[in-house]
Amino acid sequence: MGREHPTIPRKAGWVALALTLSLMGDVDPVTGQDTRGAEERADVVIRGRVVDGAGLPIPAALVGVALSNQAVMADSVGRFALPVGRPGRYRLAVEQLGYSPTEVWVEPEDIHRPLIIALARDPILLEGLEVAVDRLERRRRFYPGIVRVVEQGELAATAANTAYDVLRRTIPSLRPCINQVWSECVVRRGSVQPLTLCIDERPAWGGRDELETYTAAELYLVEVYDMGRAARLYTRWYVDNMMKRPRPLVPIAFGC
C-alpha cells in the first residue's frame, strides 16, 4: 500500500450546514443545535487484533480503511482501534512488512464486535526484510558515536501522532532554529546546534512542517545519532522497496 495523500473536501460552512440539516429535520433552525441523539452522533470505532497463522500477535501492523487516509498502527500486542465515523460497511486493508497483506469487509451488524485479522507469513518477504534490516544495522555498527534506535515495538507503544512527535519524544531538546538557516536545532553540550535530518535517505529540508506530513504509523525505524546531531527516519514503504530492490546505502559520514 503506497503512501497516498488523497484530497479531502473541506466541510461546508456552519450556516449552510445548519440550514441543510434543518430542512431535513435534524437541526433546530433557531438554535442551530443538532437534535439527533448522542448515540447516533457518536463516532464508530472498529476494534480488533492482528495475529499470524498461529494466533500470535503481530505488533505495529498497519490497519486502515482501503483507499483512504484513515489508518492506525496496531500496538505491541496487535490490538488496534480505528475510528471510522458512522456505522456502515467498511473494507479494511491490513499489512505488515514480512507478511502478505490482506483485506477484510466489516459489515454494519459486526462493526461493534472485536475483530481477529490473520496475516500469513511470506517467507520471501520475511527474508528480504531481514536482509534490509541487517544492512541498516551493519551500517550503524561502523558509526563511532552513540546511536539511539526506535524500532517497531517502541513505535507501536508510543502515543505519538506524527513523525515530529516521535522525534520530539526521542530528542527532548529538539526546537526550531532561531536563525532560520536550519529548520530544526537541538541542545548538545551546552550549545544550540543544527539537526541533520534525513527521511528515506534524502535531506528533509522542510523540518517540522515536513515531519508532520508523516504519521507515526508510516514509520518503520528511527535512528538518532549522538543525542541529536543527526536523525534518520525510514518509512514502511522505503523499507519495502529496500526488500524488493536492494540498493547501496550511503555511508553515514556522507549525510543523507
Image (cartoon, rainbow, N blue to C red):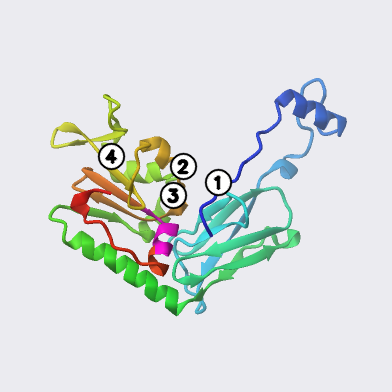
Q: Earlier in the sequence, mark 1 or mark 3?
A: 1
Specify the label residue 172 is tagged with: 4
Residue 127 in the image: state x and y as whole percent: 38, 76
Are the residues tagged 1 and 2 within 8 Å (C-beta)? yes
Q: Secondary structure at mark 1?
A: loop
Q: Secondary structure at mark 2?
A: loop
Residue located beneath label 2 in the image: 213
Residue located beneath label 1 in the image: 5
Alpha-carbon neighbours of circle 4 within 10 Å: few (<14), some, or many (≥20)?
few
Residue located beneath label 3 in the image: 216
Residue 39 in the image: state x and y as whole percent: 72, 44
Are the residues tagged 4 and 1 within 8 Å (C-beta)? no
The answer for how far apart the CA atoms under marks 1 and 3 are is 15 Å
Q: Which is closer to the viewer, label 1 or label 3?
A: 1
Q: Earlier in the sequence, mark 1 or mark 2?
A: 1
Q: Which is closer to the viewer, label 4 or label 1?
A: 1
Inspect the magenta stretch and tell me whether residue 140 lies in it. Answer: no
Q: Which residues are magenta?
A: 234-241
Which residue sits at x=30%, y=43%?
197
Q: Which is closer to the viewer, label 4 or label 3?
A: 3
Q: Is residue 62 above or below residue 216?
A: below
Q: Quadrant of the N terminus?
A: bottom right
Which residue sits at x=38%, y=64%?
242
Which residue sits at x=41%, y=74%?
126
Are the residues tagged 3 and 2 within 8 Å (C-beta)? no
Q: Quadrant of residue 36?
A: top right
Q: Secondary structure at mark 3?
A: helix
Alpha-carbon neighbours of circle 1 within 10 Å: few (<14), some, or many (≥20)?
few
The answer for how far apart the CA atoms under marks 3 and 2 are is 10 Å
Q: Amino acid at mark 1?
A: His
